[in-house]
Image (cartoon, grey):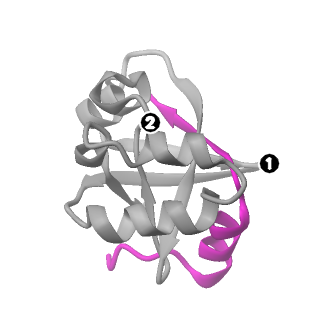
Amino acid sequence: MNGSFDAETAQLLDETREVQIETRRDENAPMHRTIIWVVTLEGTVFVRSVRGEKGRWYREVSANPSAALHVGDRRIPVRAVPVTEEQAVSEAYRSKYGRTAPASTEAMLRPETLPTTLRLEPV
């Protein structure tokens, strides 16, 4: 697996402002959905928790990296992988959201949010 989505899915995620991420603490726990922002870099999809490590979805996907994105009526199974490409991902957030939601974008760029950067790989 190369970690990249097919071109159609990557474009959909790139063009979508908000998606829902479906997570659960473990296989026996209930599923939860949370609205998040997603960015893409050359077909690779990244997410970050605006609440840092306190975010419920982030804690759940850290414990159980199997998750799914919901975009419209489409469910996209993913696996979350911690990464350190924080600067490039920050620039992608700034580029995608900075003009229309400057305060929320700055919240995504705070030092405490950077370690929650995850790459989502297709399953």
Q: Position of residue 54 (x, y in %)?
A: 32, 21
Determine the residue positioned at 30% across, 66% down.
87
Q: Residue furthest right?
A: 73
* 63 on left or right of 121: left
Q: Is residue 57 above or below residue 100?
A: above
Q: Earlier in the sequence, mark 2 or mark 1?
A: 2
Q: How many marks can you see?
A: 2
Q: Work out whether residue 32 or residue 48 is closer to the camera in this orientation and state it.
A: 48
Q: Nearer the viewer, mark 2 or mark 1?
A: 2
Toward the viewer: 29 or 96? Answer: 96
Q: Residues within 10 Å of mark 2 (few under 14, many from 20)?
A: many
Instruction: Pick the residue in front: 60 or 66.
Output: 60
Q: Residue 45: where, in percent of width, then height?
A: 46, 65
The part of the image, by quadrant, that contains residue 111 is: top left
Q: Label 1 sits on what residue type?
A: Asp
Q: Residue at x 28, y 61 (%)?
A: 86
**Which residue corresponds to the image point at 72% horizontal and 54% vertical from the top-left?**
100
Say which residue label 1 marks: 73
Q: Percent from the top left, x then y, of residue 33?
A: 58, 28
**Residues shaded magenta:** 1-23
Q: CA distance from mark 2 to mark 1?
A: 25 Å
Asked if the magenta segment contains residue 12, the reply would be yes
| Quadrant that contains the C terminus | bottom left
**Residue on which the image places disc 2:** 50
Q: Position of residue 17 (x, y in %)?
A: 70, 54
Whether residue 48 is in magenta: the answer is no
Name which residue type carries label 2.
Answer: Val
In the rendered view, tell whether residue 117 sits above or below residue 31: below
